[in-house]
Image (cartoon, helix red, strand yellow):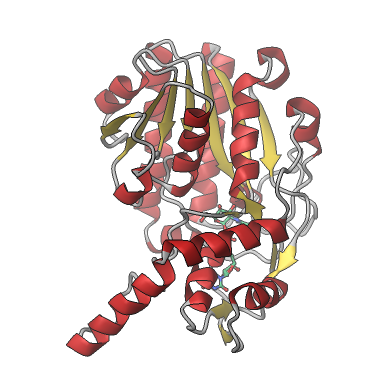
Amino acid sequence: MARFLVTGAAGFIGRSIVADLLRRGETVRGIDNFLTGKRENLVGLEGIEFLEGDLTDPFVCMRACAGVEIVFHEAALASVPRSVADPVGTNRNCVDVTVNLLEAAREMGVRRVVYAGSSSAYGDTPTLPKHEEMPEHPLSPYGVAKLAGEHYVRSFTRVYGLETVVLRYFNVFGPYQDPASYYSGVLAVFCRKMLAGEQPTIFGDGEQSRDFTYIDNVVHANLLAAEAPVERVSGQVMNTATGFRNTLNETFRILRELTGYRGDPAYAPARPGDIRDSQADISRAVELLGYAPVVDFREGLRRTVEWYRASGIATKNLVRSRKRVRRGASAAPALA
Ligand code: UD1
């Protein structure tokens, strides 16, 4: 019987948490419906008990939670622009799924749920850095959905006594992040394109900034959140980030050095729902979890570029897109 359940186990963040748990010798169950998760992300995770299933089905949630002590809830339909295009799908895969999972966790006697929140809950409030006491002003449907999930999570602590911790992730990046979708995170897209010698596009003037957080920091925070004493952390919301921020223009320049790309970026109009600046105050996670970032932005970027280079993803996608062009097919929307 598995001690841990990771939802969204075939996604970028879920698979990274699973890998760390396995390294520690833990028993892990993973679940994914492959809506955005990838089967190839499960390679190397053969030690887990894997369920293919959709958490919009309450019975699937019950099966997933049976016998488990701690849940890391990573499953979601990420992306601000995707939520702008499909708010209903975002709501279903972020909010409905979370309520179903919490209800199953309660019924099946799960002790603790660690929830993947999002910095998008803060929205476009000008205050920097963002701290957890601030009123949230989510702008995109994605931000609203992730915040609604947080409220459900905290309600299940107050009303039913389920132990919960909310970690508000800030722009996570690193190995295994899908670089090939229009909705992919910017750093995955830029790494793929620049390694393939393609010109990346910056939406807006490039002076927007983000607290880009390397995946190892997020995995570290999750493990701390699972282990921390209940009286200290249950029902709490904590930023999970580095506490710094970089503009896209700066980031492009660092990536140019790391990838060897020689050109300039293209600029296009800002995306609707996009926020300007984001930077976390991480003092609450430091105080309550003993959290500290383990890998800084530049080192994280270096490792990420090396991973994409070694995985050959950039060149594979390049070959695929060239074949499509030769066959006369129209440009695939799946390739950003
Ligand atoms: C938001 C959340 C983040 C969450 C993510 C989930 C905020 C501050 N952050 O990220 O915590 O994990 O949603 O998807 O709300 N961009 C380009 N060129 C591209 C792609 C993107 O310029 O090819 C720009 C975007 O317009 C944006 C920035 O890069 O200004 C970051 O975009 P993205 O990586 O999609 O993440 P956020 O929307 O910031």
Left or right: residue 241 versus residue 19 is right
Residue 177 in picture, x, y percent from top left: 47, 56
- Number of numbered tags placed on the structure image: 0
Residue 153: in sight, yes or no? yes
Residue 278 visible in rendering: no
Tell me which residue sits at (56%, 82%) in the image. Answer: 269
| Position of residue 65 in the picture relative to residue 221 (left or right) | left
> Looking at the image, in which quadrant does ligand 1 appear?
bottom right
User: Relative to 38, does residue 286 appear above or below in the rendering?
Assistant: above
Q: Quadrant of the N terminus?
A: top left
Q: Quadrant of residue 186?
A: bottom right
- Give the image location of residue 174, x and y in percent: 55, 55
- Identify the residue at image location x=43%, y=39%: 95
Residue at x 58%, y 57% (from the top left corner):
139
Q: Relative to 86, say whether 136 is above or below.
A: above
Q: Nearer the viewer, residue 207 or 320?
A: 320
* Quadrant into which the C terminus falls: bottom left
Determine whether 70 is above or below 18 in the image.
Answer: above
Q: Is residue 170 left or right of residue 45?
A: right
Residue 301 coordinates in the image, percent (x, y): 64, 61
Instruction: Please give the name of the residue rendered at 26% of the width and 31% of the height, measured from the top-left corner.
Output: 57
Q: Splitting the image into 4 quarters, where does residue 261 fall?
A: bottom right
- Where in the figure is residue 252, as x and y percent of width and height? 65, 75
Q: Residue furthest front?
A: 310
